[in-house]
Amino acid sequence: MHEPNATAATEDFEFAALSEALNYRNAIINEFKSFLGGRVLEVGAGIGQTSEAILRLPGVRELVALEPDPRFQDRFRKRLPDVLLVGGTTRDLPDGETFSSAVMVNVLEHIEHDLAELAALRQILLPAKGHLCILVPARPEIFSKLDAHFGHFRRYTRVDLRDKLHRAGFDIVSLHYFNFVGYFAWWLRFKVMQSMSFDINQVRLFDRRIFPVAYALESRLVRPPVGQSLIAVARAV
């Protein structure tokens, strides 16, 4: 992984809120579960919240986690002492290292040279023709002060992410917006009201009461025209 944005002004990023977003996190893994198997690389593993969900997938034989931030490495190792954690970026992986699949959840937006990072991951996945599973923040029109506070360089459109994946050497398997209701919640709280923090109680309420119904509709009936995030699965070719 190329260096993430060092200007991030918070030590926990989305971790505190994500700890309450159990249904949200499970939905992300549900989108990826058919493509994560064998030897899996998690890029930007943070403190291991998503890692725990990945490890529960039956097809995952081994998980290798990458995390460049020392503040998060200690918490990850305490949480998942049996998982190999590489304290660094993709450049710190041994030469010739390959994986069956890779996953990045809310990571690519922290990397200034995102196309170079995607190209590096393609090289790692190419021998196995493996899959890259990505979730990124979506829609530039809702980029907020909180995005900048988290160290986000950008929010993506579907066209932008598709173009960068193609240029990096991937074929698109699936690409769609995710969390339609969350788009409007983010716009209101962080773009209009310019809040600089999550309300944990609101996150818990949204995750328990609203998100399950909304996700059932968008995953089973029709994918939304916009969303708080974008989900992509791409194959190295």
Image (spheres, rainbow, N blue to C red):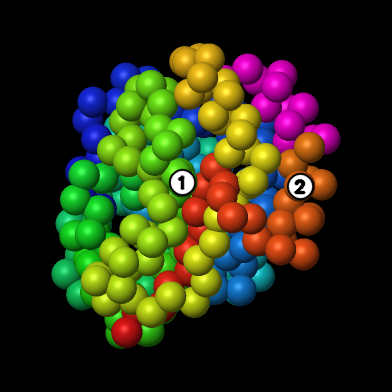
Identify the secondary structure beneath mark 2.
helix
Q: Amino acid at mark 1?
A: Ala
Q: Which residue is mark 1?
A: 138
Q: Main secondary structure of the magenta part?
A: helix
Left or right: 116 in relation to 150: left
Can you tell which mark lies on residue 214?
Answer: 2
Q: What span is colored magenta in the figure?
A: 198-209
Looking at the image, is 169 positioned above or below residue 27?
Answer: below
**Could you classify mark 1 by the number of other residues whose Cα lies within 10 Å: few (under 14), some (14-19), or many (20 or more)?**
many
Q: Nearer the viewer, residue 27 or 75?
A: 27
For this view, does 226 lie left or right of residue 154? right
Residue 137 falls inside the magenta stretch:
no
Residue 10 at least partly seen: yes
Q: Is residue 160 above or below residue 208?
A: below
Q: Position of residue 160 (x, y in %)?
A: 34, 58
Image disc number at residue 153: none
Indicate whether 97 appears above or below 42.
below
Which of the two residues, 9 or 161, is positioned nearer the viewer here?
A: 161
Task: Give the percent coordinates (x, y) of residue 16.
Answer: 56, 26
- Disc 2 and disc 1: Cα gap in Å? 17 Å
Residue 98 point in image, percent of width and height: 31, 74
Q: Residue at x 53, y 15 (%)?
A: 193
What residue is shown at x 41% (from left), y 26% (from top)?
A: 144
Amino acid bearing label 2: Ala
**Which residue occupies 22% across, 65% down?**
120
Counting residues from the start of the chain, the first of labels 2 and 1 encountered is 1
SS for tag 1? Answer: loop
Q: Can you say whether 20 is above or below 172 in the image?
A: above
- Residue 137 in percent (x, y) is at 45, 44
Q: On the rendered image, what quadrant is the C terminus found in?
A: bottom left
